[in-house]
């Protein structure tokens, strides 16, 4: 008798979750006397299960942390480098993330961030001397990933400054030029740009530059146009690559923004990397002194050395863009509820998330090894090109699935993924298209060139 009484008592405890109106409605549909009799016939295990279902375990389920580094590659970093990675992540989360959607929407650049980037002192991260950190290429890649994880435009701005512009001077400049420019560029006191691509010349830059230079008594006279030049609208100096009319070779120059004959027009109407201020540069009889010519830039091979060094960074940017999209989507699906529960609990959503993570993890392990090769001095063009091809392709897949699991909300800037979707398209094309990089790899593995 006491056992039956205890069970009925427990049944009443279950009913405490139901208010009087609900109980009245239930009594119209259910014979409560029979229900109570049924409770009395439950064994102990059945009753415990029912109580657990009604009450839960009394604890809020703790979800695993959102971490796109599924294979914990960050554990391979030294304690010092790991601390630097986390420092950059904190900077991007606290200083950059609150601003980017507004500036991306309005096609403007957050100039207030430049001094803060300067305080980090990380531009030219792999260079030795001139106030630069002299870190590994691996850390340069990690830095690019952490920036692109929050915003690919900011990562691109930094990549142009640190990699292309400073890299041209570091690899091809004189000692005097390095001393003059690199310390200021490291502190972001001077902003640089890199002028290679032209209105009619993109992939064919190796042999088809139409911007020309000619040596005269006054100096070098430059004529032509450059297009898609990041940072060009506000840069203090622009590295210009031009074909010498006398010997047909490509040469490099440091052009200052106040040079007569230099003008720049902002490119408007972009759907991607809208924070990056791309410019159309026109050079009309610009005279550049011999001291501002890069003395170790005497053919396109020298230009290619700069591109090879920075192309690995673009692959890392693709990884960052993909990681930002994946982590944003995972966070969203754990919070968004439909049919009474988070959509992350649905099989099809989990399938999308796992596919995204699989691609992301493959990309991360690839670029990690790529940077190890670069640090060992073993990086070849085809290594960087394969990474650029694979990572930019898979990033497209990941951002597409991230938008898909977010439904209609995926096209809203407030959820970030829409920006990642758009920016992935620019990453897919710059620093060598998929087709050109594929031919570089194809030539390496077949021994046959398919270039026209």
Image (tube, rainbow, N blue to C red):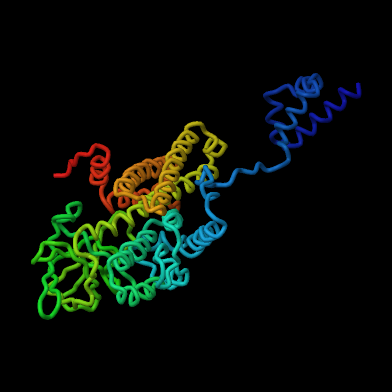
User: Which quadrant, please, contains the C terminus?
Assistant: top left
Where residue 366 sits, quadrant-wise, is top left
Tell me: 442 left or right of 39: left
Where residue 129 sits, quadrant-wise, is bottom left
User: Which quadrant, please, contains the N terminus?
Assistant: top right
Tell me: 265 left or right of 60: left
Is 84 rendered above or below residue 374? below
Tell me which residue sits at (25%, 48%) in the image: 433
Task: Tell which residue pokes out farthest to the front in this image.
Answer: 377
Is 404 rendered above or below residue 210? above
Measured as percent of width and height from the top left, residue 100 is found at 41, 61
Task: Tell which residue pokes out farthest to the bottom in this image.
Answer: 218
Q: Is residue 417 visible?
A: no
Measured as percent of width and height from the top left, residue 53 is found at 70, 31
Tell me which residue sits at (55%, 60%) in the image: 80
Tell me: 71 left or right of 270: right
Tell me: 190 left or right of 358: left
Measured as percent of width and height from the top left, residue 294 is found at 24, 70
Count of numbered tags: 0
Tell me which residue sits at (67%, 24%) in the image: 29
Q: Is residue 239 visible?
A: yes
- Nearer to us in this view, 12 or 185: 185
Where residue 3 sits, quadrant-wise, is top right
- Nearer to us in this view, 234 or 362: 362
Is 395 rendered above or below residue 56? below
Measured as percent of width and height from the top left, residue 361 is found at 46, 42
- Nearer to us in this view, 280 or 194: 194
């Amino acid at each position: 008798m006491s056992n039956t009484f205890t069970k009925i008592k427990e049944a009443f405890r279950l009913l405490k979750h139901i208010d009087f109106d609900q109980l009245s409605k239930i009594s119209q549909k259910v014979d409560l006397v029979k229900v109570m009799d049924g409770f009395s016939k439950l064994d102990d295990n059945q009753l415990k299960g029912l109580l657990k279902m009604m009450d839960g375990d009394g604890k809020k389920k703790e979800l695993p942390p959102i971490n796109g580094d599924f294979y914990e590659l960050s554990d391979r970093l030294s304690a010092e480098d790991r601390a630097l990675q986390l420092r950059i992540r904190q900077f991007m989360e606290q200083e950059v993330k609150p601003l980017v959607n507004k500036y991306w929407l309005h096609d403007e650049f957050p100039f207030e961030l430049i001094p803060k980037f300067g305080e980090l002192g990380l531009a030219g991260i792999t260079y030795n001397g001139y106030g630069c950190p002299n870190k590994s290429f691996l850390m340069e890649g990690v830095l690019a990933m952490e920036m692109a994880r929050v915003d690919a435009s900011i990562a691109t701005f930094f990549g142009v400054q640190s990699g292309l512009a400073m890299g041209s001077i570091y690899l091809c400049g004189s000692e005097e030029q390095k001393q003059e420019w690199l310390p200021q560029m490291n502190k972001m006191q001077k902003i640089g740009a890199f002028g290679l691509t032209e209105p009619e010349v993109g992939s064919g830059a190796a042999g088809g530059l139409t911007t020309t230079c000619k040596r005269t008594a006054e100096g070098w006279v430059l004529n032509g146009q450059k297009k898609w030049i990041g940072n060009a609208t506000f840069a203090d100096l622009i590295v210009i690559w031009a074909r010498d009319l006398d010997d047909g070779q490509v040469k490099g120059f440091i052009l200052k923004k106040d040079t007569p004959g230099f003008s720049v027009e902002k490119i408007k109407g972009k759907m991607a990397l809208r924070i990056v201020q791309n410019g159309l540069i026109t050079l009309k009889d610009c005279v550049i002194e011999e001291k501002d010519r890069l003395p170790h830039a005497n053919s396109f091979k020298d230009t290619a050395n700069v591109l090879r060094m920075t192309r690995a960074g673009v692959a890392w940017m693709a990884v960052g863009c993909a990681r930002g999209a994946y982590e944003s989507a995972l966070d969203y699906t754990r919070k968004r509820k439909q049919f009474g529960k988070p959509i992350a609990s649905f099989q099809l959503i989990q399938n999308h998330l796992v596919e995204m993570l699989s691609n992301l993890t493959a990309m991360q392990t690839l670029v990690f090894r790529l940077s190890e090769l670069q640090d060992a001095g073993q990086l070849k063009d085809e290594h960087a090109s394969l990474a650029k091809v694979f990572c930019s392709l898979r990033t497209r897949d990941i951002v597409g699935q991230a938008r898909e699991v977010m439904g209609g909300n995926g096209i809203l800037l407030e959820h970030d993924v829409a920006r990642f979707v758009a920016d992935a398209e620019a990453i897919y094309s710059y620093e060598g298209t998929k087709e050109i990089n594929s031919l570089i790899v194809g030539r390496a593995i077949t021994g046959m060139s398919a270039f026209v």
